[in-house]
Image: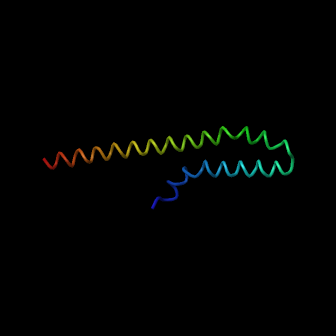
Amino acid sequence: MIPSAKAFPCWLPMGFCAALSLIALVTHVVSSDAWVTPFLAFLPMAFFMSGESDRQLQLRISVLEKRLEELEGAKSAAAM
């Protein structure tokens, strides 16, 4: 099981988008034009957070693949 501290960065963009959508929805109900500005202003941040989370996951995967290749190389060298 993944510890919650390691899983948090993956869910952060989703939480930010949910909060942004909730703010836009509440503001739209109260005032018809006021929701557009905060929604469009913070939308690039949602894309950035999602992309950064994905980049970190890809970096972690590449490090783990490199370690796996090293271990398999050492295992095959020891078998010879």
Judging depth in this view, the residue of 73 and 4 nearest the camera is 73
Image spot of residue 12 (x, y percent): 60, 50
Residue shown at the point (65%, 40%) measured from the top left: 45
Residue shown at the point (64%, 52%) measured from the top left: 15
Judging depth in this view, the residue of 78 and 43 nearest the camera is 43
Judging depth in this view, the residue of 60 and 25 nearest the camera is 25
* Residue 20 shown left or right of residue 11 in the figure: right
Residue shown at the point (68%, 52%) measured from the top left: 18
* Residue 66 shown left or right of residue 77 in the figure: right
In which quadrant of the rendered image does the N terminus lie? bottom left
- Colour treatment of the image: rainbow
- In this rendering, the count of numbered labels is 0
* Residue 16 shown left or right of residue 31 in the figure: left
Seen as rendered, the residue at the extreme bottom is: 1
Seen as rendered, the residue at the extreme right is: 31
Image spot of residue 3 (x, y percent): 48, 59
Image spot of residue 78 (x, y percent): 16, 48
Quarter occupied by residue 41: top right
Image spot of residue 2 (x, y percent): 47, 58
Residue shown at the point (39%, 42%) measured from the top left: 62
